[in-house]
Image (cartoon, rainbow, N blue to C red):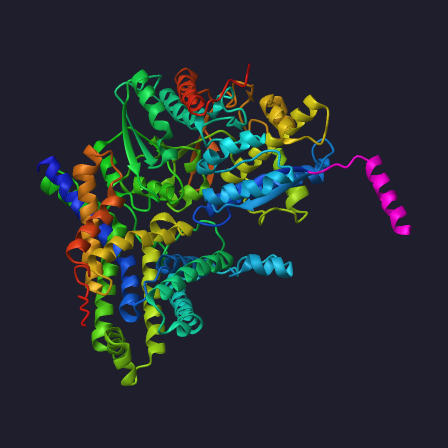
């Protein structure tokens, strides 16, 4: 009898008070394996931002956040396993951190009504929200990167690249080949000669490619590299004395990892970015105070301000802002994944908002809509200072050529829609 | 000089240099296979482990620091000193010998007489175990590797300006050769000469060859199999360290370093699994073959990036006509 009364009392209390579950953010990290050097800082930045929100603000809208980390080792099969094992935990948004995993999760997340954010990677044409209802790739994608590099070079050359020669050194994979179509179109538009130089995975030996560059003498080299390919390419470029200031990597070729091995020879190397670099932002004071000093950092606390830590933090910030937007739209604090998708689709990032978050000029302003899941594609350029061992932003976040990219996105997404019988989701 | 001919000679020379680097990795495989019949899948990871240990010792990094800090709540990461490269190499060699002893003591001693596939599986397990230990010991972050004899006298990188200038004056085209590749070639030559002399002229070397020829016969004349296998794994560990230094100097020391083993496989298929000169000649043929193919056919007609598959295809062609490889021992099974 006592047991029954006790049970009834507990049941009554549970019914009377609303139970706030955590806002769950799965983190498909790769802290092990050949790409761990890049995976660790991203995962740390992603986790630390949510830890800070919990400690400083009591979560988001009064609901605590929880990061559910699952190790993929940058392996597509493991990534899918991670998705399957965490999707039932109330996961709000997935950041697969791999183009391979992204391709596998596009149909799965759509069927499960869970949004996915592939910031600066994944399927570029997912920017078309009319076809890819649950995939978002704001604020920039691979094609924005290619166009951003060309726009930067246009600025450097007084608005004309006529007669110039640009080589693309790329990882010989689906990822590395992404910019080829964009650069081909842009070469026709701006009159530069475009040359492709593929490098096979993993890219530890690139002598042939750099001898070819030495012979061809391109004016500029753009690189879409990954992992060890980046470090070797920077070293080989230095070996043939290619001017580092004319060598521009995509954002996955633009972290400290990619240049430190080459030492002073890497000085002046440039990379594209869609977020700020360094730790000179007020938010890092809060990270240090509420996370690192409190002993709650995801890692050793020594990655703060590195390029990939900042990228992880930026991804977390964008996810947190989407949650706030969803909470406003739906009038509930404890949102679901479907509501999170609505929040992402209505996300608006302004400079005022960024400054209020302690991240002034950290990233571009952009708006997401049902049809546009990619934002406006603003891209900046950073440069490596080997003596100071630091990156600096040397350009504003500038718009990419949406006339060229928009047409390519429409073409590719239309083909995907036709293949998969997808109807417009933005009626 | 005709421009195309100059380019071809340059590609040929760089192919030879790349081949030496492939051969350095292949040598470790050959040493172990020759003495014990084990195809050591862990050779690439051994190069990674050796290079990580070297950098860790050089930088005065506390091994297993993350583990120690997590268990005891401490905040130690570095000893606060910097170890000279030569001493660090010496200490790394000691670590690799200790590793060889442990591998023999805890793994292969218990697998004597097992099928080759079982031994191969054991090396796969060893590779993953060693990768995990390396991660725990030294961390996953990328580390720059710089081996220096003295301040300002480090492993050279970049174009050899003397060669470029001389060839430009003589032929009208300045050839590119990487200084690091020249050092690697000298080191490889010394290493191979040293290994051959060790095998020919020392008691342990002769015992090693005896074990390689016939385990049972060697045992019957009092050669300790246990000792020889520890010796062979130690030598393979030393070769792995040299390969790790040369490859790590170029790309930094990181977990991808273990993938250099992929470059050694076609060399082994071509040169044979049991011949030290075979590893060298195989490496040179693969290096020159893949570079020339990429330059003359791959890049102009096939869109480039042909080196990986061409190396394996070339090795496959050799396999068809000479299954034991160029220098491998012909296997004759008598009924």
Q: Position of residue A403 (x, y in %)?
A: 41, 15
Q: What residue is rendered at 19% in x and 69% in y?
A: B333
Task: Identify the residue at horizontal 47%, vertical 38% (top origin).
Answer: A101
In percent of width and height, residue B332 lies at 17, 68
Residue A291, magenta (yes or no): no
Q: Which residues are magenta?
A: A1-22
The outermost residue toward the bottom is B221
Does residue A4 show up magenta in the picture?
yes
In-image side of A103 versus B330 (left or right): right
Q: Pick the quarter of the image with the N terminus of chain B.
A: top left
Along the viewing direction, whichever of B285 and A386 lies nearer the viewer: B285
Q: Nearer the viewer, residue B273 or A166?
A: B273
The answer to whether residue A118 is seen in the rendering is no
Front position in the image: B286 or B54: B286
Which quadrant would residue A23 be assigned to in this image?
A: top right
Q: Is residue B173 above or below residue B210?
A: above
């Amino acid at each position: 009898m006592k047991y029954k009364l006790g049970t009834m009392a507990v049941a009554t209390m549970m019914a009377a008070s609303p139970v706030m579950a955590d806002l769950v953010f799965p983190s498909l990290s790769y802290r092990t394996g050949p790409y761990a050097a890049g995976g660790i800082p991203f995962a740390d930045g992603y986790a630390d931002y949510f830890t800070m929100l919990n400690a400083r603000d009591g979560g988001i809208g009064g609901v605590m956040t929880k990061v559910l980390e699952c190790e993929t080792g940058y392996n597509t099969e493991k990534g899918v396993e991670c998705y399957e094992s965490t999707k039932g935990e109330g996961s709000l948004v997935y950041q697969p951190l791999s183009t391979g995993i992204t391709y596998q999760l596009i149909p799965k997340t759509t069927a499960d009504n869970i949004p996915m954010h592939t910031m600066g990677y994944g399927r570029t044409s997912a920017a078309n929200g009319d076809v890819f209802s649950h995939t978002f790739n704001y604020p920039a994608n691979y094609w924005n990167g290619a166009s951003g590099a060309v726009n930067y070079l246009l600025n450097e050359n007084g608005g004309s690249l006529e007669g110039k020669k640009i080589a693309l050194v790329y990882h010989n994979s689906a990822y590395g080949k992404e910019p080829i179509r964009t650069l081909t179109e842009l070469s026709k538009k701006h009159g530069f000669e475009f040359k492709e130089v593929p490098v096979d995975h993993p890219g530890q030996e690139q002598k042939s490619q750099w001898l070819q560059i030495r012979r061809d003498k391109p004016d500029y080299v753009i690189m879409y590299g990954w992992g060890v390919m980046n470090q070797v390419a920077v070293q080989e470029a230095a070996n043939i004395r290619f001017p580092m200031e004319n060598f521009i990597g995509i954002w996955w070729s633009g972290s400290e990892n990619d240049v430190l091995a080459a030492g002073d020879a890497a000085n002046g190397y440039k990379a594209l970015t869609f977020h700020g670099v360094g730790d000179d932002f007020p938010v890092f004071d809060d990270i240090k105070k509420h996370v690192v000093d409190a002993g709650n950092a995801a890692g050793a606390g020594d990655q703060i301000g590195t390029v990939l830590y900042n990228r992880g933090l930026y991804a977390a910030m964008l996810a947190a802002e989407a949650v706030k937007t969803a909470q406003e739209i739906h009038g509930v604090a404890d949102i679901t994944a479907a509501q999170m998708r609505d929040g992402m689709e209505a996300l608006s990032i302004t400079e005022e908002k960024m400054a209020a978050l302690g991240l002034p000029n950290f990233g571009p302003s952009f708006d997401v809509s049902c049809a546009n899941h990619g934002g406006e594609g603003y891209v900046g350029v950073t440069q490596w200072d080997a003596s100071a061992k630091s990156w600096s932003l040397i350009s504003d976040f500038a718009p990419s050529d949406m006339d060229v990219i928009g047409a390519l996105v429409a073409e590719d997404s239309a083909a995907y829609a036709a293949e998969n019988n997808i109807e417009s989701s933005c009626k | 000089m005709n421009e195309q001919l100059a380019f071809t000679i340059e590609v040929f020379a760089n192919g030879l240099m790349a081949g030496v680097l492939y051969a350095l990795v292949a040598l470790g495989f050959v040493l172990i296979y020759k003495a014990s019949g084990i195809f050591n899948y862990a050779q690439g990871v051994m190069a990674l482990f050796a290079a990580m240990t070297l950098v860790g010792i050089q930088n005065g990094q506390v091994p297993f620091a993350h583990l120690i800090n997590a268990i005891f709540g401490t905040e130690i990461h570095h000893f606060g000193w910097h170890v000279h490269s030569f001493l660090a190499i010496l200490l790394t060699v000691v670590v690799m010998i200790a590793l060889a002893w442990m591998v023999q003591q805890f793994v292969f001693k218990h697998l004597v007489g097992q099928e080759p596939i079982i031994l191969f599986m054991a090396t796969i397990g060893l590779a993953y175990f060693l990768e995990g230990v390396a991660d725990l010991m030294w961390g996953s972050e990328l580390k720059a590797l710089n081996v220096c004899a003295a301040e300002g006298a480090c492993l050279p990188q970049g174009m050899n300006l003397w060669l470029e200038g001389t060839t430009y004056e003589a032929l009208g085209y300045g050839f590119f050769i990487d200084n690091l590749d020249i050092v690697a070639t000298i080191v490889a030559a010394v290493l191979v000469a040293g290994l051959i002399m060790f095998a020919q002229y020392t008691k342990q070397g002769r015992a090693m060859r005896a074990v390689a020829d016939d385990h049972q016969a060697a045992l019957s004349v009092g050669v300790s199999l246990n000792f020889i296998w520890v010796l062979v794994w130690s030598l393979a560990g030393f070769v792995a360290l040299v390969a790790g230094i040369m490859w790590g100097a170029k790309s930094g020391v990181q977990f991808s370093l273990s993938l250099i083993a992929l470059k050694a496989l076609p060399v082994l298929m071509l040169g044979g699994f049991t011949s030290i000169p075979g590893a060298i000649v195989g490496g040179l043929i693969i290096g020159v073959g893949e570079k020339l193919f990429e330059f003359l056919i791959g890049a102009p007609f096939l869109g480039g990036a042909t080196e990986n598959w061409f190396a394996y295809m070339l090795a496959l062609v050799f396999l068809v006509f000479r299954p034991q490889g160029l220098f491998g021992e012909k296997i004759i099974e008598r009924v």
